[in-house]
Every structure is written in C-alpha cells, then in structure tokens.
Image: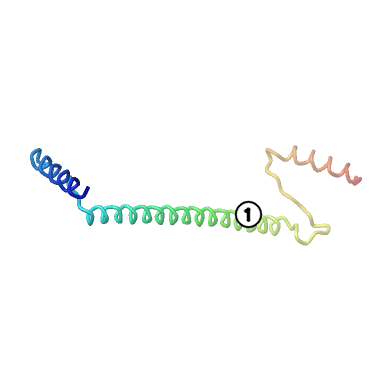
Amino acid sequence: RVHRQGRAQAYLKAYLKEIEQESLILDGQEIYRLNARKLIDFHLREWIKRRRQEARVRRATEFIVKGAKTFLVTRRIFSMQNNLEGGGDNLCMYFPERVAWGALVCINVAHRIVGLP
C-alpha cells in the first residue's frame, strides 16, 4: 500500500511538473500551516466581530444615557422656569399662542373632572 502511494505521489508530482503547476504539491507541514492559518483567521474574525458588537452596544448605551440626561435636565429647567416645584398660588404655565386655545380647553376639562371651578 505504501509502495502504491509512493508511485501515485511520484506520478502526480511528475504530471504537475509537466503542466507547470508544481505549486499545487503540498506536503504535510504546508497543509498543517494552512490549516493553522485558517484557524487563526477564523478566530481573529470572530474577535473583531465581537469587538464591533461590543462597540455598538456601548454607543447605543451612551445614546440612551445622553437622551435620558437631556430629558431630565430639560424637565428640571422647564419646572424651574414655570415655578412648578414650589406649587402654591404662583403656579403658572406658558403655552405658545398657536396651542393656547387647545391647552385652555384641556385644562378646563381636567378641572371639571376633578371638580374644580
């Protein structure tokens, strides 16, 4: 069996030399190196993919946190500007003229629901 394999290998080498494709002959070490290179490439691609996913998650988290902070600061400034934190008699809210009528209607409906004049 080994003898046949040697003859087949010799024939294959001779044939590849004839057609000038000697580079197709690979020995065990070259095959081992190629497989190792493929394995390294695979793990490197997986590592890069994982790092990109982590970066996407980090950016999304930063975006959500920035939105939440903006909302809280805007709400606090709005409350301070309109004296909503103190309550009492000085409670006032300002609406743009284009929506003032709708706001008054909503406030009057809310007053009727809770029983205020």
Q: What residue type is labelled 1?
A: Phe
In this rendering, position of residue 25 left or right of residue 72: left
Where's residue 33, x and y in %? 26, 56
Where's residue 97, x and y in %? 69, 40
Between 84 and 21, the one nearer to me in the picture: 21
Q: How is the image coloured?
A: rainbow
Mark 1 lies on residue:
71
Residue 22, quarter of the rendered image? top left
In this rendering, position of residue 95 left or right of residue 115: left
Q: Identify the secondary structure beneath mark 1.
A: helix
Where's residue 27, x and y in %? 20, 52
In this rendering, position of residue 51 left or right of residue 103: left
Q: In this view, does 37 lie above or below 20?
A: below
Residue reaching furthest bottom?
86
Q: If the image is split into quadrants, where does the C terminus sit? A: top right
Image point 51% across, 54% down: which residue? 57
